[in-house]
Image (spheres, helix red, strand yellow):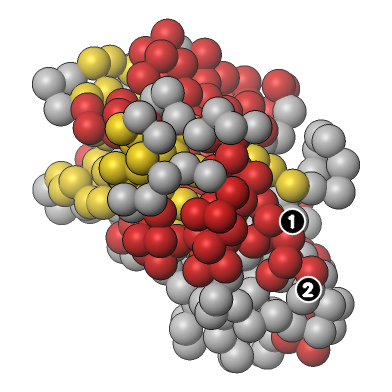
Amino acid sequence: MRPFEYVRADDAAAGAAAALQAPGSRFLAGGTNLLDLMKEDVERPPRVIDIRRLPLGQIERTRAGLSLGALATNTETANHPMVREHYPLLSQAIVAGASGQLRNMATNGGNLLQRTRCNYFYDTAMPCNKRQPGSGCAAREGLNRIHAVLGWSEACVATYPGDMANALYALDASVRVRAASGAERLMPIGELHRLPGNAPDRDTTLAPGDLILGVELPVAAAAFARNSHYLKVRDRASYAFAMVAVAAALDMDGNRIRQARVVLGSVAHMPWRSAAAEAALVGQPAGPEAFRRAGEAALAEARPLAHNAYKVELGRRAVERALMRASRLA
């Protein structure tokens, strides 16, 4: 780990000012991803700004739905009675991630910002455009079994590794962000992450000094509470990131689907919400045939690499399985 300056922020304004004074600074909350990256010499922030004293740990009901503080831990969020009752898909996704020890430390804001687990990103001896722009993408022609099949570019084929965000995309969540100027904005979560394009070093649309304050879950998303399921397919049952994950949610009228949400994880640089799969489900009776068509639609634009073609068929079947479980037909 390289030397860095440690700063403790007593309020959001002080944290933003400290970040702007030292370009490349990082905010520290739970530290479950950042500290690992620093130890591996992947992240080299000149300044680490501790924001754990900020009053951002609340989880509370609002007129619009439910507000999740950025510094609430994953454990607190997954176990909160209102989350479990009205947004069980989020509880399932969080519990599917990491271990109990990590969930006790990891925060909601930090979880959204976790970085890829691409082996070449972590290996500083290898070229990686995400770690060092312009150096190349070793995974493009290397061992790319865990890499993207959707939305990748010639510059980067890495995937977003998280689980919580997949559920939040399915629940139409929004993210409250404070800019360095002090202005606050509420952005749909689908605008937070980005595809790699020619700038894979940028995981999100956040600007320097931007601070995530919380996540807002809308009341309308509670319509999916009865019929939702999070499926995570991985090499082993714990301490492993997904090969493919699916957040599936249905709003049912009897056996007919009124609304559908299908979000895939670990197949792209960001959580991949499939509008095509959702359109294939709306108005259809729930059942294997509709779910099979949704799976095919979700992966119709897949472009597998040399070693991950299995993700295409696995993704189709995972979508079908997740929808079957969400509909309570399996």
Residue at the disc numbered 2: 308
Q: Residue at x 50, y 54 (%)?
A: 290
Q: Quadrant of residue 123?
A: bottom right
- Under circle 1, the secondary element is loop
- Residue 45 rendering spot, x and y as whole percentages: 56, 58
Residue contact at pointers 1 and 2, CB within 8 angstroms: no
The image shows residue 38 at horizontal and vertical percentages of 68, 53
Q: Quadrant of residue 266?
A: bottom right
Which numbered dot is residue 243? Answer: 1
Q: Amino acid at mark 2?
A: Asn
Instruction: Tell me if 223 is positioned left or right of 292 in this view.
Output: left
**39 and 186: which one is in front?**
186
Residue at 63 percent of width and 83 percent of height = 303
- In the rendered image, residue 325, in percent from the top left (x then y), is placed at 59, 34
In the depicted structure, whether residue 232 falls above or below residue 26: above
Q: Is residue 200 visible?
A: no
Mark-to-mark CA distance, 1 and 2: 9 Å
Side of 229 where 305 appears, left or right: right
Callout 1, which amino acid? Answer: Met
Q: Position of residue 124 (x, y in %)?
A: 78, 72
Residue drawn at x 33%, y 52% is 282
- Quarter holding the C terminus? top right
Give the residue displayed 31% in from the left and 26% down from the top.
Answer: 222
Mark 2 lies on a secondary structure that is loop
**Can residue 320 be seen here?**
yes
Chain-order first, disc 1 or disc 2: 1
Label 2: few (<14), some (14–19) or many (≥20) C-alpha neighbours in 10 Å: some
| Residue nearest the viewer, comparing 186 with 1 | 186
- Between 274 and 285, the residue placed more toward the observer is 285
